[in-house]
């Protein structure tokens, strides 16, 4: 069968690989139908992802169908459509024992640390499959991206009626917005890019947007919107160091700051600012199994509308040619979906 391999940064190859063996105990054999392309794949392609190892078959946002299951797999049956939780955790380390496998000390993510889903068939632990009778394959492939926002919002706990500021309106920021909406908090979005702010207003129903101009005007605008108090909860989903340092200024007294975006640099902040406001700073990483199940239920109940999400599509055979365009914000890409 054919797979797409990221041989080294900037270089994909379509290669022939062996079909997987029969599923062993606890495993399931799946047929991959959809693969969402995300910032992690793009960073891997651009050579900007610190944890990425090459050569690698990418693909961690997956809509699959179960073909066969091994001994002891009872949660899913052949024929079922599933989302895949791509975070393979050890189930033994401190974090895993506390039920926090999303930040397992020995975490291996499909398509990042080990080969992922850009191939027609592969084996996956049965307990990492989350089935739905109702969801379309596209929707199943969106669950992982939504998981990032779901977990971040769980970390930040925005309350109904209070303001929540989301900095960065890329796919990860949008996934945060989806879950802030469900809390009843009032959303404000800050971004450099006017087009992305328009998308938030027109497609996501966001009432307040602020354009970041780099002249400090965003802080005044934020004060105007919040009646001077600033934001009780701030999510930074930019992946930009400067923005993450600035974000401390946007947090209200007693407020919470959640770093969703990831950088390799150090983040600097003023201790008096942190202390005066008695701020809580949180990181958010990946998502938990219960969050996958919650998201599937929310889409099934039509409480999350996935229609605005997929802006680009490609067939498996055309991906290598199309991929470089997905790295450019100008193309308006939010989520590109690969069909197999
Ligand atoms: N927490 C997790 O588990 C997790 C999972 C996946 C991705 N991420 C990270 O989330 C981040 C965002 O990913 P993405 O795919 O949405 O990226 P993206 O680049 O598509 O979006 C980032 C957005 O931030 C905006 N931005 C950049 N600098 C800004 C600034 N100074 N002020 C305001 N806006 C600014 C950009 O215009 C852009 O719209 C990345 O760092 C990525 O690595 C985290
Ligand atoms: Zn992803
Ligand atoms: Zn672990």
Image (spheres, rainbow, N blue to C red):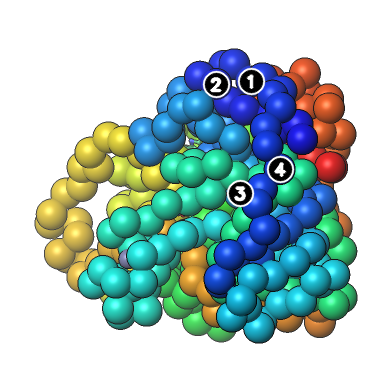
Q: Which mark is residue 19?
A: 4
Q: Is residue 139 depicted above or below 239 in this figure? A: below
Q: Is residue 65 depicted above or below 335 in this figure? A: below
Q: Secondary structure at mark 3?
A: loop
Sequence-first tag of 2 and 3: 2
Q: Assess mark 1: CB under 8 A from ligand 2?
A: no
- The residue sitting at 46% across, 23% down in the picture is 47
Q: What's the CA distance linking mark 2 and mark 3? A: 17 Å
Q: Which mark is residue 12?
A: 1
- The residue sitting at 85% across, 38% down in the picture is 313
Sequence-first tag of 3 and 1: 1
Sequence-first tag of 1 and 4: 1
Label 3 environment density (alpha carbons within 10 Å; few <14, some 14–19, many ≥20): many
Asked whether residue 183 appears in the rendered view, the answer is: no
- Residue nearer the viewer, 219 or 18: 18
In front: label 3 or label 4 = 4
């Amino acid at each position: 069968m054919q797979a797409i391999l990221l041989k080294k940064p900037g270089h994909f190859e379509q290669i022939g690989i062996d079909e997987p063996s029969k599923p062993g105990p606890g495993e399931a054999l799946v047929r991959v139908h959809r693969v969402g392309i995300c910032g992690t794949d793009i960073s891997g392609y651009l050579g900007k992802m610190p944890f990425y190892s090459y050569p690698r078959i990418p693909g961690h946002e997956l809509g699959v169908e179960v073909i066969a299951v091994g001994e002891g797999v009872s949660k899913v049956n052949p024929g079922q459509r599933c989302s895949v939780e791509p975070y393979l955790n050890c189930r033994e380390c401190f974090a895993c024992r506390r039920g926090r496998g999303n930040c397992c000390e020995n975490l291996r993510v499909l398509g990042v640390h080990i080969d992922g889903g850009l191939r027609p068939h592969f084996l996956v632990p049965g307990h990492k499959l989350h089935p739905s009778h109702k969801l379309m394959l596209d929707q199943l492939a969106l669950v992982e991206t939504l998981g990032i926002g779901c977990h971040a919002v769980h970390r930040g706990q925005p309350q109904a009626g209070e303001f929540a500021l989301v900095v960065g309106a890329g796919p990860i920021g949008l996934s945060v917005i989806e879950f802030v909406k469900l809390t009843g908090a009032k959303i404000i979005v800050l971004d450099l890019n006017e087009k992305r702010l328009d998308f938030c207003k027109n497609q996501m129903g966001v009432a307040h947007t602020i354009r970041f101009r780099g002249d400090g005007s965003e802080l005044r605008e934020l004060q105007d919107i919040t009646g001077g108090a600033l934001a009780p909860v701030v999510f930074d989903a930019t992946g930009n160091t400067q923005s993450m340092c600035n974000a401390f200024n946007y947090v209200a007294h007693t407020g919470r700051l959640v770093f969703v975006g990831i950088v390799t640099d150090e983040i600097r902040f003023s201790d008096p600012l942190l202390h005066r406001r008695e701020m809580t700073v949180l990181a958010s990483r990946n998502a938990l199994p219960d969050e996958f199940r919650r998201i599937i239920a929310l889409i099934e109940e039509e409480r999350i509308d996935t229609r605005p999400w997929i802006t680009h599509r490609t067939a498996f055979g055309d991906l290598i040619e199309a991929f470089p365009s997905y790295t450019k914000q100008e193309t308006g890409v939010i989520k590109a979906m690969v069909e197999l």
